[in-house]
Amino acid sequence: MPEPVASNPVGLCGFYGKLPARGDFVRAGLPRSFTDPWDDWLQAAIAASRAALGEDWLPSWMEAPIWRFALPGGSCGDLAVLGLWMPSIDRAGRHFPLTLALLAPGASAHDLAGRGTLWLDAAEQAGLDALEHVIAPEELTARLDAAPLPDGLAPGSQSNSALWWTAGSPFVPPSSLRLRGLPDPAQFATMIRDPDGNPAHNGCVEAS
């Protein structure tokens, strides 16, 4: 079970996953309606990437890029989601991402991606500080609460597509994806290590 951490009183944003300061999963501010399907996807994706990458998995994970995403409602729970995940590890040495996310009822993924940069920047820095033990897990909630929220979001959905993008890493070039929701678990290996240096998802790939 996730270890208790002071929760976001508003419930709009929070985090889920692993932190070096804790010995098990942590969850704060995010409902199970999001974290349960998110965890199911990550567990399947990590297992598939381990099978695909073999002995290259660990070095790939340690250098994996930070992926940002904007999901329309229905992709991972009922609400639209803006967030990011970064590679992490717990106190016992078990590898699993740290996810920081903002739930936005009625928003479109397109608007979230376009108007959420300041929130994503603040959330990313807070997550990195938590990974580096600069701040305690309890302080992570306060940092997310203080992050500037996207404004001017239009109601409804301009598209059913989910947007994923990364600035890249030593093993993955800057890339973006346009999908119908969560990536196929079999695709996850290419999100942490591109085997060819010129991945199919480099640039923007439209949902099929």
Image (cartoon, rainbow, N blue to C red):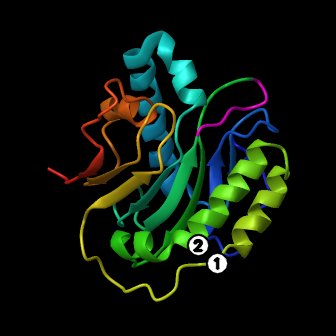
* Mark 2: few/some/many CA within 10 Å (<14, 14-19, 20+): few
* For residue 167, above or below residue 93: below
Q: Is residue 66 above or below residue 48?
A: below
Q: Amino acid at mark 2?
A: Leu
Residue 69 visible in the shown view = yes
The answer to whether one can see residue 75 in this image is no
Q: Secondary structure at mark 1?
A: loop
Q: Which residue is mark 2?
A: 118
Q: CA distance from mark 2 to mark 1?
A: 6 Å
Residue drawn 78% across the image and 32% down it: 23
Q: Position of residue 198 (x, y in %)?
A: 29, 34
Q: Pick whichever of labels 2 and 1 is earlier in the sequence.
A: 2
- Residue placed farthest to the top in the image? 55
**Magenta span:** 87-92
The residue drawn where x is 79% and y is 67% is 142
Q: Is residue 108 left or right of residue 17?
A: left
Q: Residue furthest bottom?
A: 152
Residue 118 placement, left or right of 199: right
Q: Specify the label residue 148 is tagged with.
A: 1
